[in-house]
Image: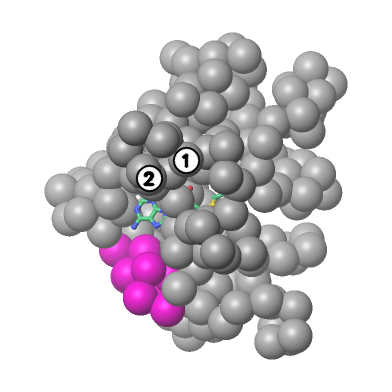
Amino acid sequence: MDPVDRRLAEAARGFMPVDEGLALHAHAAACGTDGPFLEIGSYCGKSAIYLGAAARDSGRLLFAIDHHRGSEENQAGWEWHEPDLVDPSVGKMDTLPVFRRTIHNAGLESTVVAIVGDSPAVARHWTTPLALVFIDGGHGTAPAHLDFEAWTPKLISGGTLLIHDVFPNPADGGRPPYEIYLRALDDGFVETAAVGSLRVLVAP
Ligand code: SAH
Ligand code: MG
């Protein structure tokens, strides 16, 4: 990854360790399938810098879906809550302003296209075949399985599926991302790499 992109990505706010971010970038850059990339769960834009740099360098778009109101685990009282991301006039989280600043500062505004809305609702209207899907949205049972069911059929054969926060050991984290990873294997996806909690699979 270009050192400037890497510095920006590391400085960005969010939940993507450096080694996993660099793996995101490397596998996106190595994606040999034509078509756009799509991310579910953008938060403040950290993972979108890693994926977006690879998209830009291969002349593609990265669609970045998030309703920007935070997952269950980002709400007040939960482990992953950041109080300064609440819009006080609305009383809800709003990560969109930070996301836009992140993408602007990374020079990726013509590559990363924000889609602000509910992921399964967007998927119902989505017909463009995708070269890469990165699943990092809601980690509860229903959101994770809905994202899996909604988006993996949109992948082109040979395309790349990336799933974040996969923890085989229950002591390390929640189950749903691990469960959808198992479903992917069951559906014939082939695992090609694992870095931290990131899993990389090729679509059948
Ligand atoms: N990839 C990010 C972290 C994502 S956190 C990073 O690199 O830092 C998970 C995100 O999923 C949150 O921002 C939350 O708003 C979003 N999310 C959860 N459920 C969603 C849904 N149903 N539709 C769209 N976005 C959702
Ligand atoms: Mg994550």
**Residue at coordinates 51% horizontally, 57% vertically from top-left?**
76
* x and y percentages locating residue 52 in the rendered image: 57, 29
Magenta residues: mostly which secondary structure? Answer: helix
Instruction: Give me the disc on residue 86.
Output: 1
- Identify the element where label 1 is drawn: strand
- Mark 2 lies on residue: 92
**Residue at coordinates 54% horizontally, 14% vertically from top-left?**
104
Q: Earlier in the sequence, mark 2 or mark 1?
A: 1
**Residue at coordinates 53% horizontally, 27% vertically from top-left?**
98
* Residue placed most toward the observer, 37 or 116: 116
Residue type (three-letter) at the residue carrying disc 1: Val
* x and y percentages locating residue 80 in the rendered image: 62, 58
The answer to whether the beta carbon of the residue marked 2 is less than 8 Å from any atom of ligand 1 is no
* x and y percentages locating residue 169 in the rendered image: 74, 86
Quadrant of the drawing holding the C terminus = bottom left
Can residue 110 be seen in the rendering of this structure? yes
Quadrant of the drawing holding the N terminus = top right
Q: What range of the chain is rendered magenta?
A: 141-150
Q: Are marks 2 and 1 in contact (CB under 8 Å)?
A: yes
Can residue 56 be seen in the rendering of this structure? no
Classed neighbour count for the residue bearing mark 1: other residues with Cα under 10 Å, few (<14), some (14–19), many (≥20):
some
Residue type (three-letter) at the residue carrying disc 2: Lys
In the rendered image, residue 148 lying in the magenta stretch gets the answer yes
Q: Is residue 104 above or below residue 66?
A: above
